[in-house]
Amino acid sequence: TGGRPLRGTVRINGAKNACLPLMACALLTDQPVTLRNVPNLSDIRNMQRLLDSLGCSLSQDGDALTMHAAAQSKIVAHYDIVRTMRAGSCVLGPLLASRGKAKVSMPGGCAIGDRPVDLHLRGLEALGATITLDAGYIVAEAPQGGRLKGANIFLGGPNGSTALGTANVMSAAVLAEGTTVIECAACEPEIEDVGRLLIAMGAKITGLGSPRITIEGVESLHGTPTEGHTVLPDRIEAGTYLMAAAITHGDVTLENFPTDTLGAALDRVRESGVTIESV
């Protein structure tokens, strides 16, 4: 039933599309990693289940989530959990880099046809990994000696760059020996956020937000600082509320609004006659 202007105040949650690969980064260290502004979503809870099955202990206090991958021997991401979320494959790169081997279910199990993670696998192979398929599972193994090797990697495909593929390859390359350059890297703000967390954990990364990301490999990463890492606000959620307020002639205050990731949307909404104020 229309004709009702929206009024009130809403706080924008953390971005799910950043939080899932951010959570996977906890597998890269045996020290605690804390994320703040974690949204309360089923995909987040499923990723918690997946990390728990991979040896992570987890504790939550409000929107703060602490993950500690003290057990470093588990390498299998089982189908019954991975199938519940498209982003389950983002544990592939971190597991391979930190544990030398990963066995991750395809999101669709033994699906026949084009694999949606082809670009992920191409990037990991360029770092020296051996990739095989085994009954619906991707099996990735690091070279003899257990450490990946830096490489120049092109991640473009028929549909452009891949966000999760960039996160996977970048997460693997931070522990590789030497320099990795990712060409046609995803430029999304969520991938920038993953890079910022990795840098806070001791990685050496430049070029975030551009189509060329350069990673200087390090031998190990540490946990997050005491205050943790704050997940950036969800631009899809923020944009949805923005448009809903505009089209109903509403008066809405959006807290934790990601102004720097919605410049184009804000410009067009202002151009259409909507008053927007930053307070």
Image: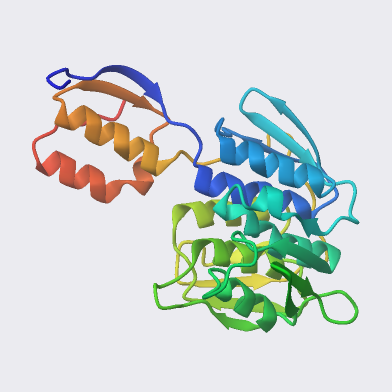
Q: Position of residue 124 (x, y in %)?
A: 67, 76
Q: Position of residue 23 (x, y in %)?
A: 67, 46
Residue pictured at 82% horizontal, 61% vertical: 220
Residue pictured at 74% horizontal, 82% vertical: 128
Tell me if residue 229 can be seen.
Answer: no
- Please tell me which residue lies in front, 31 or 8: 8
Residue 204 placement, left or right of 139: left
Vertical side of 77 occupied by 33: above or below: above
Tell me if residue 266 can be seen.
Answer: yes
Kindly indicate the quadrant of the structure image that contains residue 78: bottom right
Kindly indicate the quadrant of the structure image that contains residue 164: bottom right
- Please tell me which residue lies in front, 46 or 225: 46
Q: Which of the colour schemes (rainbow, by chain, secondary structure, one colour) is used?
A: rainbow
Residue 143 placement, left or right of 131: right
Residue that lies at the very extreme toward the left in this rendered image: 273
- Please tell me which residue lies in front, 197 or 157: 157
Which quarter shows the N terminus?
top left
Residue pictured at 15% horizontal, 31% vertical: 247
Tally of numbered tags: 0
Q: Position of residue 234 (x, y in %)?
A: 44, 40
Which quarter shows the C terminus?
top left
Q: Position of residue 253 (x, y in %)?
A: 31, 22
